[in-house]
């Protein structure tokens, strides 16, 4: 990228899209590179470093550089979805491989680990990841190749002490990977706490506008494991498309202001409804009553994310009715976008989910927080 930005805060680097200035035109917005193939030099070499669009692309590389800087890593691989990023990280493990993963984690990925991973020679133990001792007890010396964490984790926003698990992982020579989709690099940088890989569903906060499906893996080192992930992405064709990479870059330029606002607004929503007699519980790591609050306060800076859940005291039917009556919040899955979303999570997770049936998951967007609170108030009132 550019040497001028080598010493600046990651927020500055992201706001300026890594400082890319087009050499030919001086354009201050990075041009979109769509080519799938590149000219060979007369001496038969590829001196510019680009050969074909499946392994690599400059627009993708530029967005990767921004994310690498945001996470303080050595390299990033962007993929066509968060699921592709995560499965690339698992498929790159040396076999036989045992993986320790959280009981409470992103539902789609838990489904893959429970039902699909075995056919790939991957054996998984699900544990209570809020306890470092429980994680330690699940490690099978020599067989366990990876500990997978998600913190705060869907949809209870349980928190894991990343630094403590990193110490454990190092003792056992196990790769520590963290799904940091909800925290974003604005609030937490797992690599700085000792993790080896950080994964994002870039579909969510990194892009932030509910219009791109994308994923990422950022690595602490350019090591053999990183090379195995590069190979997986190349062989399976999991690279992000250049159009999506361009949109993702645009999204990341405003990441810091969006996440700061969303965290402040989510805290206001959490505090407001914590005092509401119609709400049995507000699950938000920013509240001192949340079991993960002390750890979250230590490992997250500047806020506790825009995600929270509320449990409706009158039960499942009342929760679904509340979601039915909102006018501003959108009844939809996903998270991290500009528009606030509300979801009866148990309905989408189905049988076997640890999600309570009276739970509504809230993704706080960028609308005025007074409007969001008033809308939830009137929707809860519809239960009376
Ligand atoms: C959405 C999500 C994923 C999966 O990402 P996709 O882009 O939908 O494949 C993984 N982890 C978390 C925490 C998510 O929210």
Image (cartoon, helix red, strand yellow):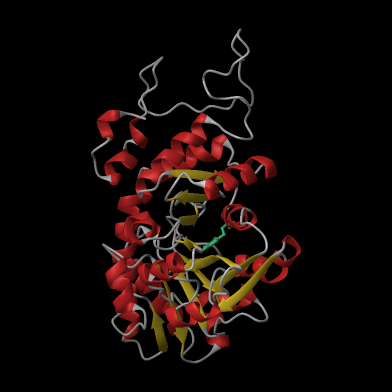
Tally the marks. Answer: 0
Residue that sits furthest to the right in the current view:
119
- Name above or below for residue 192 compared with residue 280: above
Which of 348 and 381 lies nearest the eye of the viewer?
Answer: 348
Looking at the image, residue 184 sits to the left or right of residue 301; the answer is right
- Name above or below for residue 102 compared with residue 192: below
- Name above or below for residue 210 compared with residue 309: above
- Which residue is found at the position 57% from the left and 85% from the top? 357
Quadrant location of ligand 1?
bottom right
Residue that sits furthest to the top in the current view:
42
- Which residue is found at the position 39% from the left and 41% from the top? 66
x and y percent of residue 215 in the render? 54, 51
Which of 206 and 36 lies nearest the eye of the viewer?
Answer: 36
Residue 131 visible at all: no
x and y percent of residue 224 in the render? 54, 47
Looking at the image, residue 303 sits to the left or right of residue 22; the answer is left
- Name above or below for residue 272 compared with residue 384: above
């Amino acid at each position: 990228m550019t040497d001028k930005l080598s010493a600046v805060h990651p927020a500055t680097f992201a706001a300026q899209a890594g400082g890319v200035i087009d050499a030919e035109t001086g354009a201050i917005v990075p041009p979109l590179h769509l080519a799938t193939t590149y000219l060979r030099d007369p001496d038969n070499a590829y001196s510019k470093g680009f050969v074909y669009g499946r392994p690599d692309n400059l627009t993708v590389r530029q967005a990767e550089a921004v994310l690498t800087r945001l996470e303080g890593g050595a390299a990033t691989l962007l993929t066509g979805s968060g699921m592709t990023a995560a499965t690339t990280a698992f498929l790159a493990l040396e076999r036989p491989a045992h993986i320790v993963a959280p009981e409470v984690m992103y539902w789609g990925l838990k489904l893959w680990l429970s039902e699909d991973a075995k056919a790939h020679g991957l054996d998984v133990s699900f544990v209570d990841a809020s306890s470092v001792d429980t994680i330690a007890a699940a490690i099978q010396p020599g067989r366990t190749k990876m500990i997978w964490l998600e913190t705060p984790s869907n949809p209870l926003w349980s928190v894991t002490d990343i630094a403590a698990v990193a110490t454990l992982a190092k003792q056992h020579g196990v790769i520590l990977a963290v799904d940091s989709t909800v925290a974003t690099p604005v609030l937490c940088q797992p690599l700085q706490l000792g993790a080896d890989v950080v994964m994002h569903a870039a579909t969510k906060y990194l892009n932030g506008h509910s219009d791109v499906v994308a994923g990422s893996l950022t690595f602490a080192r350019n090591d053999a494991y990183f090379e195995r992930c590069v190979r997986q992405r190349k062989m399976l064709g999991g690279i992000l498309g250049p159009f999506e990479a361009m949109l993702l870059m645009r999204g990341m330029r405003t990441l810091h202001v969006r996440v700061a606002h969303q965290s402040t607004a989510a805290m206001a929503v959490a505090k407001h409804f914590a005092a509401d007699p119609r709400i049995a519980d507000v699950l938000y790591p920013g509240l001192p009553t949340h079991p993960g609050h002390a750890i979250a306060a230590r490992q997250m800076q500047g806020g506790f994310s825009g995600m929270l859940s509320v449990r409706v005291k009158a039960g499942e039917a009342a929760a679904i009715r509340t979601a039915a009556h909102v006018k501003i919040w959108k009844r939809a899955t996903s998270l991290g976008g500009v528009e606030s979303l509300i979801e009866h999570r148990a309905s989408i997770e189905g049988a076997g989910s640890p999600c309570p049936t009276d739970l509504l998951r809230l993704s706080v967007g960028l609308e005025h927080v007074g409007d969001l609170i008033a809308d939830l108030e009137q929707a809860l009132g519809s239960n009376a």
